[in-house]
Image (spheres, helix red, strand yellow):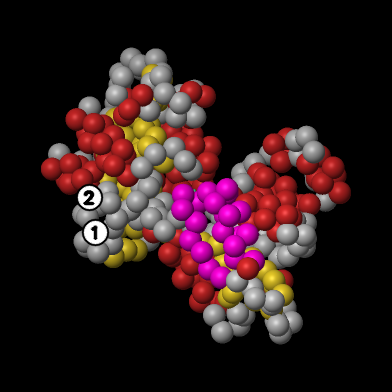
Amino acid sequence: MSRTTARTATLLAGATLLAGALAGCGGGTTATPAAAEGPRIAFLVPSTSLRSMAYDVPNFSVELAHRCPTCVVDVRTAEDQAEQNAQGQEAIRDGAQAVVVVALDGAQAGDLVSAANSADVPVVAYDRLIKGSAIDYYVSFDGGAVGELGGRAILDAVGGDTAGGAIVMLQGDPADNNAGLFAAGAHSVLDGKVDVASERYVAGWSADQAAVEMRSALADLGGRRLLGVYTAYDGLAAGALQALTEAGLPGVPITGQDAETAALQRILAGTQTMTVYKDLPGQARATADLVADVLDGQDPQTTGTTDNGAGSVPTVLLQPQAVGKAQVQSRVLADGYTTVDALCAGAASRTCADAGISAGS
Ligand code: BGC
């Protein structure tokens, strides 16, 4: 079985997702075909993103099923852009009528986009912009606003007392266009207000690499106090916290992004200051609506356009929200984004109880 085929899982929209498919662990999982199989939509995601596997794949499948019950979502998970390009080309040969892509390296997806263009198959960049080639749509969050929320949280936590101190910034994967957008947003509020001792981009958004970067960033402080750590993602915050704990530096303000369950638990426990929360089901819904409209031959509703270097791409942009301790209950749980059972499992039950969060609260 080829590398590509081994990572392929064909899912009927709305069908239960199978664990093997989600883990991208090979074996090729195919759900029972529906009596009347409708259009196939390729959904190409990184195997390395917790978010894609835990949220985007199931959310998009469920949302598309609402609009197009016979649609088949063909999920393929890739480790790098070359593999994703090959998967997209294969999905198009297999008859995909639309391709929805969370790119690993948005500047290197040209082969995939040209194959789609030649076959007249629309390409939707999901969350991460594809640059330099002619894509049809882009659905994401306002990346500048994501960074601004984290930056503002650092300033709030630091207050006016910045003398003799500096912050560290851990940005995302340099191949992901979002990393640059988040960084620019954070700088727009932090620059001129607080010194930055060290700023590092973390390959693959990896928590382990974030710990490595944080350890060496501490050396860049050169005797200054560590005022705070801006990180562009909850996984990076986890890695940075590991390095801070090893260095005996508890209680440093630290930001994240994605409202991962582990981060919400840290926020309740007081070890992480905030996270940037995105309505991922809403993003999946917006994309499913857009894809269903396009398949129906209608013009989908968009909120603006984005210049991707190859043209002006019709875009749907959603707004992120800051979540600190006070908003875990009122925003994240109230939205049904996660459940008390998931948030308060195991060791977290104590922190939840201290924060007054319990089933039915
Ligand atoms: C997404 C974030 C996610 C990160 C790491 C970014 O492109 O916008 O939501 O945290 O990738 O997976």
Whether ligand 1 has any atom under 8 Å from the Cβ at mark 2 is answered as no
Q: What element does badge 1 sit on?
A: loop
Q: Amino acid at mark 2?
A: Gly
Residue occupied by mark 2 = 110
- Residue 205 falls inside the magenta stretch: yes
Q: Earlier in the sequence, mark 1 or mark 2?
A: 2
Q: Nearer the viewer, residue 325 or 284?
A: 325
- Residue 186 falls inside the magenta stretch: no
Q: Nearer the viewer, residue 117 or 159?
A: 159
Query: Residue at 48% of width from left, 61% of height from top?
Result: 201
- Looking at the picture, how far across and down is residue 36, in whole percent? 30, 18
- Looking at the picture, how far across and down is residue 87, in whole percent? 28, 34
Query: Residue at 65% of width from left, 44% of height from top?
Result: 261
Q: Are marks 1 and 2 in contact (CB under 8 Å)?
A: yes
Span colored in magenta: 198-218
Q: Is residue 119 left or right of residue 81?
A: left
Residue occupied by mark 1 = 132
Q: Amino acid at mark 1?
A: Gly
- Looking at the picture, how far across and down is residue 86, in whole percent? 25, 36
Location of the C terminus by quadrant is top right
Label 1 vs label 2: CA separation?
7 Å
The 10 Å Cα crowd at callout 1, few under 14, some 14 to 19, many 20 or more, is: some
